[in-house]
Image (cartoon, rainbow, N blue to C red):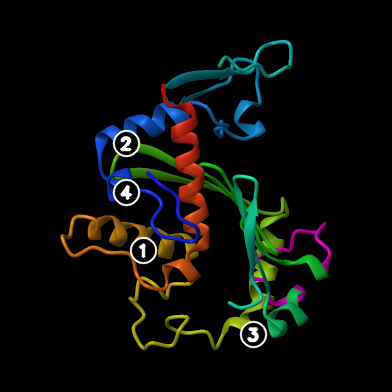
Amino acid sequence: MTIMANQMPVLPVEAYTSQSWFDREMEAIFSRTWQMAGFVEDLIDPGDYITIQAGLNNILVPHLHSETLYMYAHRQQKTGFAGHHFHFFEPLSADYLDGIENNSPLPLIDHIPKDKIGAYVPMLFPNLGLSETESSWSTFYVIPVAPEKSIVELRTKVMPVSDWQFMAQEWKSWNFFKNFKGDKYRTGNPDDPLASGDFMAEDIYVCEQQQRSFKSPYFSVGAIAKDLEQSVYQYQRNVQAFVEDNSQ
């Protein structure tokens, strides 16, 4: 593999399709980087435990009786990299933010300043995403299981308030959302997989279509990739560096 400034792709198609590449990444990347085990509440009582497959490592995380956890093994968006980690921020639209106390369909996270509210989606290399909105906090953990198959595990937290408060907030938000019908881009097709408003479902759909395209003899990288896919370019650079530095 060779690197040419701002050229796509850095990695060959085989990096997404072949068993040999998958095996190299499991050994060189997923066995040597931080992997998500779970949340603290997964280990509430002594005797609770979590098992994790982190690359080639089988890891057990138990809650022992000492009360200590031990481990055995659109336009205004801002994106970029901090080291190997990707970050994304997009502020809320002005009309939604202006009446956020009433417009949010879920109770607001009460410790976020109003001028800092927006969609934060950092991606911790290689496979853990964190997402924060005005009313929820989520993790999305991408678990590689085969060259052309991954499991995306989503976990979301909201404010710990009563059912009544959730219901009251939903009622208050009705006035803002009552006119939002159909798909978000007004294409007239409510079944459009890229217009659901669920960014995770949309991203998964795009990845699945891209994965299928690799099998075509006509596959090529688009002309605008070098300008609009810098995050993919940098991520491939990170993968390349890990594979080359850690290959035995």
SS of the residue at dot 3? Answer: helix
Q: Quadrant of the N terminus?
A: top left
Circle 2 Cα neighbour tier, 10 Å, few/some/many (<14 / 14–19 / ≥20): some
The residue located at (28%, 55%) in the rendering is 211
User: Where in the figure is residue 130, as x and y percent of width and height?
Assistant: 61, 50
> What segment carries the magenta color?
101-114
Mark whose residue sits in front, 3 or 2: 2
Q: Label 1 to label 4, Cα distance in Å?
A: 19 Å
| Mark 4 crowd level (few <14, some 14–19, many ≥20, 10 Å Cα) | few
Estimate how packed mark 1 is, as few (under 14), some (14 to 19) or many (20 or more) residues with alpha carbons within 10 Å.
Answer: few
Q: Is residue 110 magenta?
A: yes
- Circles 2 and 4 in contact, beta carbons < 8 Å: no
Q: Are marks 3 and 2 in contact (CB under 8 Å)?
A: no
Please name which of the two marks, 3 or 4, marks the residue nearer to the observer: 4
Image location of residue 87, percent across then percent down:
63, 56
Q: Residue at x 40, y 34 (%)?
A: 25
Of marks 1 and 3, which one's residue comes earlier in the chain? 3
Residue marked by disc 2:
21
Quadrant occupied by the C terminus: top left
Closer to the chain start, of discs 3 and 4, is: 4
Q: Which mark is residue 206?
A: 1
The numbered mark at residue 12 is 4
Of circles 1 and 2, the one toward us is 2
